[in-house]
Amino acid sequence: MRFEEIISEVPVCGMLAEVGCDHARLTELALRRGLCRSAVVSDISAACLEKARRTLSGYDCVRYIVCDGVPEGVEPDCLLVCGMGGHNVRDILSRYRGRATLVLSPQSHAELVREALPGMGYAIERDRCFEAAGKYYDVIRAVKTDNPAQPDGMQIKYGAYYKEKNPALRARLERLLGCLRGGGDANAARIAEITEVLSWQK
Ligand SMILES: C[S@@+](CC[C@H](N)C(=O)[O-])C[C@H]1O[C@@H](n2cnc3c(N)ncnc32)[C@H](O)[C@@H]1O
């Protein structure tokens, strides 16, 4: 399921922060797995943070903060930003000045996040597509580094490791290819790109 897939990318750490936590099910799973000793959960919405308080009521190592983006003065080892569109994830990260390992799962426009990470001093260490309940998602783990490599255009669009075999990526792109073929010549360039990615997935 989606929570399990995302949390499998969280390293064992001291403090985990989840920005845009809503119900905080991701943080709950990380705590339950013993991946972090403490957690900060934040959300721009006070009502969402109330949901988080209910989910995490059994834990006394959690701080709750209502704010836009990463809370000031919080220095986590790992920062989770998941379940928002790529524009929003990129905006939140552009205002972040820390060094935490990032675990990101943009709901859409993951390419905006991949493109922006090197400019923020982050290298993409893991990047994969997965399927949960019939939908496809991306999860990206990035680490602060001095000279992050800039992904090329294909890596930005299809994932930094699109040449590595991944049944979920293959299924996602085969489905997309079927839709694009119905659109005729207008989609020729995109079809050629996807065919190139799929050639690595056979
Ligand atoms: C769909 S929920 C995702 C919840 C959880 N992270 C997950 O992936 O299951 C997105 C949450 O992000 C919050 N959010 C959106 N923009 C935000 C921002 N700029 N700063 C903090 N929280 C934000 C919303 O209020 C909402 O609760």
Image (tube, rainbow, N blue to C red):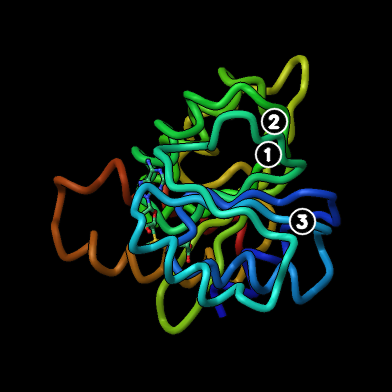
Q: Mark 2 points at which residue?
A: 123
Above or below: residue 64 compared with residue 131: above
Q: Position of residue 197 (x, y in %)?
A: 52, 51
Q: Residues within 10 Å of mark 3 (few under 14, many from 20)?
A: many
Looking at the image, residue 196 sits to the left or right of residue 107; the answer is: right
Where is the C terminus found, in terms of image quarters? bottom right
Q: Which residue is drawn at 67% across and 26% down?
A: 98
Q: Which residue is drawn at 43% across and 58% down?
A: 83
Residue 39 seen in this snapshot: yes
Q: What element carries label 1?
A: strand
Q: Position of residue 134 (x, y in %)?
A: 41, 82
Q: Name the residue under label 1.
A: 142
Q: Identify which amino acid the numbered label 2 is placed on.
A: Ala
Q: Quadrant of residue 168?
A: bottom right
Q: Residues within 10 Å of mark 2 (few under 14, many from 20)?
A: many
Q: Mark 3 points at which residue?
A: 38
